[in-house]
Image: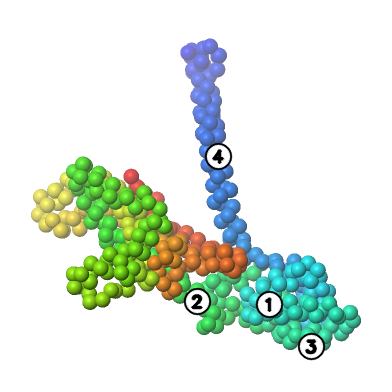
Amino acid sequence: MAISDGQIFDEPHGIPLRVTLMRAERRHRVKALILVLPLAFFILIFFVLPIARMLVNAVHDDTLLTLLPRTISELRQWDGNGLPDEPVYAALVVDLKQTIDQGTAGVIGKRMNYEIAGVVSKVTSSARKAQELSTGPYKEALIKIDALWARHDVWSLLKRGTSPYTFYYLLRAADYQYGPNSEIVASSPGNAIFQDVWLRTFGISFGVTLATLLLGFPVAYLLATLQPKHANLLLIMVLLPFWTSLLVRTTAWVVLLQRHGAVNEILVASHMISQPAELIYNRFGTLVAMSHIQLPFTLLPIYSVMKTISPSYIRAAQSLGAGPFYAFWKVYFPQTLSGVAAGCLLTFILCLGYYITPALVGGPSDQMVSFFVAHYTNEDLNWGMASALGAILLTATLTLYFVFNKLVGINRIKLG
């Protein structure tokens, strides 16, 4: 190396050392970027894009706009009062004739049936009978074919189809819907199910979180204070659920909690109960099975924080006159709150998306939001409702995380 004009030079190349260091740092950054790119692409393709598609599907539906183009175009001129004029009905006849050739009458009827029950067969029947119409007036002819086309709420629905975006699915997911004049109204009592589903989902998640906290905190404290050889053995027992699949663990609880399972047999044999109790296919079975599965997720963050707390704090408090409980509650416990918050947040968020366990050990009144997402995805093929429920669940999760981050300081939590 050489020094000239206050700069340090790399002698073999005559390049300032500062420039050499900057180039080396740049090369390291490029290498790091190359190593990270595969993971970034994986997250983008399998995580970010599906979530973005779900959010779009929750508000996007161009079924009517695509399959009834002439009718929708004419409806843009309709003011929404009374029934549309003759040109709209004429355009509808042309579109209905085309649906028979394309086989899309059922798709239109299904989309309309989401908002107005019982119209699928009427739409398909009208499409078939419209093939016989060759001259007008089409308004009277269509109404004669089916009174469906004389209903104002039907035309209000088609009028909303002029936009490819709709809030119907999000409203339906909160037990609201569009009224006859496109106003937002509460769903009828027979169709209002989702508010109970949301309360049930959050209630079960909170119950499981509380149960795992009450069970996991003492065990975490025991793990943190035991000798290492004993603590390691106990930690292996805590981690055992991770070594078996979720389905196997849930099925094991079905075997244990059924009417003539091991738990009921022990309770009856010990004369604690006179006849087998209903421990499964209800809320109790759901809470027990989910708590067993989620216990390590609550326990491990608490344990990792407890391991960093020096026992000298408790001894110092006791040397100053504090009793064992007072020293624990005032000195030790506040230092564990970051772990408690992290464990509870993780468990609560994971519980919000549970599907298999409530489906296997819960009853009809114990199914959570994920059950309905799967139902609309696999059975009804209603991607709009499935996406709306998923979008609301995602929003609730992000909101919960934001609140915890503000109140507890999640960004400073140490997980080990």
Viewer-proximal residue among 275 and 33: 275
Direction from residue 157 to residue 246 in the image, left or right = left
**Could you tell me which residue is drawn at 65 percent across and 64 percent down?**
60
Residue name at image x 25 percent, y 52 percent: 220
| Dot 2: element | loop
Secondary structure of residue under mark 1: helix
Q: Where does label 1 land, which residue?
A: 120
Q: CA distance from mark 1 to mark 2?
A: 23 Å
Image coordinates of residue 142 in percent, x first then y, are 80, 83
| Residue that carries the numbered disc 4 in the rendered image | 38
Q: Which mark is residue 193?
A: 2
Identify the amino acid type marked 2.
Ile
Which comes sooner in the sequence, label 2 or label 4? 4
User: Foreground mark, 1 or 4?
Assistant: 1
Left or right of 69 in this view: 400: left
Q: Are marks 3 and 1 in contact (CB under 8 Å)?
A: no
Counting residues from the start of the chain, the first of labels 1 and 2 encountered is 1
Q: Residue at x 54, y 25 (%)?
A: 23
- Front residue of 226 and 36: 226
Q: Is residue 406 visible?
A: no
